[in-house]
Image (cartoon, rainbow, N blue to C red):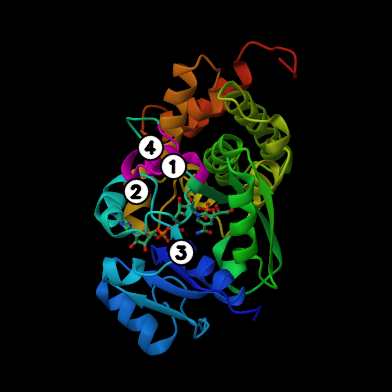
Amino acid sequence: MSERQGKVAVFGAGSWGTAFSVILADAGNDVTMWARREEVATAINDTHENPEYHPGTELPHNISATHDIEKAAHGAELVVLAAPSQTLRKNLTDWAPFLPKDVPLVSLMKGVELGTLERMSEVIAHVTGAGPERIAVVSGPNLSKEIIRREPAAGVVACADEEVAKTVQARVHSPGFRPYTSTDVVGCEIGGAYKNVVAISTGMAAGLGFGDNTQASLITRGLAETARLAMQLGANPITLMGLAGLGDLAATCSSPLSRNRTFGEKLGQGMTTADILASSHQVAEGAKSSHSLRELAAKVGVDAPLAQYVDDVVSGAKTVTAIMDEMLERPTKAETE
Ligand SMILES: NC(=O)c1ccc[n+]([C@@H]2O[C@H](COP(=O)([O-])OP(=O)(O)OC[C@H]3O[C@@H](n4cnc5c(N)ncnc54)[C@H](O)[C@@H]3O)[C@@H](O)[C@H]2O)c1
Ligand SMILES: O=P(O)(O)OC[C@H](O)CO
């Protein structure tokens, strides 16, 4: 473990909230996790294990958990948010009155809200009133099951205020996790949300029995689509070549551990969205963000065929085979257009 640091509150005790707490604990922070269900908090305190999300993994003893919002937030020097993107606004409305007013708020979410089409940092700003200098985003190729096994990985800490990004970087730099800083919050958030949609598409191709050429083509065109939207929203294109773009795409689109890729694979094998959702309680963000990203792209005048196709299959409007044919039949154009 690294040199001792102060208290960090992590709101959300699911797959990523728990694995990220291990990074924080290994970096020397005293971590208090807030769990939605009291029995999860009790299990973490009594057994040093999160039996639901990471059974069999012993958590460091400088992690504790509570179901009490006030207790979780009290005295925290850093607040980390790890809820599903589509429930964040409701969750945060409950948490906000108890959060310390002057500490960084760190978003771990990778999604865009349905309806408002807001990125997670925008939702955080609107619900808490925090300015951009207090809101940081952590993103990158970080599959929770590998992170919790302490397999080496890197990520990006993005904040409009570089000094705050550096502060958060120092608190999450553990023996297994190497964080880089960035001031490109938009690029990191769009990269993180879009890679889930692209992973669903590569999963669909795999589910149909197509191999690496098909999947690499989808990943590459998915990256082009991600970059088009992110740049239109003001992102630096170099961010999309980095850990929060290409890095996360490579991990998520190829890993059997990815919930989004697995979701797509099941669609490709003929399962319906309703059946897949009923078979897992864990979040596959791309299922919802395909729709919000499609709408966001339309709103700012960006062509986003992959988000459209994935959304059409997820909603049941089209079949996987139909969209694969449609993708190939689109009018041809220059690669860099
Ligand atoms: N799991 C990963 O490997 C990973 C890595 C990086 C980023 N992320 C991102 O982190 C965010 C959280 O993902 P996760 O993997 O922890 O998800 P998860 O499904 O494993 O856990 C979600 C957590 O949110 C809680 N929650 C609070 N309110 C909820 C509600 N109304 N409905 C459902 N759950 C509710 C759940 O109890 C649970 O603790 C997502 O945006 C995801 O894309 C995940
Ligand atoms: O399991 P997924 O598909 O939600 O992906 C998890 C992480 O975002 C990978 O970086």
Q: Going from the N terminus, do you reach mark 2 or mark 4 first?
A: 2
Tag 2 residue? 88
Q: Is mark 2 within 8 Å of ligand 1?
A: no
Q: Quadrant of ligand 1?
A: bottom left
Tag 1 residue? 120
Q: Residues within 10 Å of mark 4 (few under 14, many from 20)?
A: many
- Measured as percent of width and height from the top left, residue 153 is found at 69, 62
Query: In the image shown, does 17 or 195 lie closer to the viewer?
Result: 17
Q: CA distance from mark 4 to mark 1?
A: 7 Å
Q: Going from the N terminus, do you reach mark 4 or mark 1 first?
A: 4
Tag 4 residue? 113
Q: Amino acid at mark 3?
A: Gly
Mark 1: secondary structure: helix
Q: Is mark 3 within 8 Å of ligand 1?
A: yes
On residue 17, which mark appears?
3
Query: In the image shown, does 260 or 293 lie closer to the viewer?
Result: 293
Q: Quadrant of the N terminus?
A: bottom right
Proximity of marks 2 and 4: CB atoms separated by less than 8 Å: yes
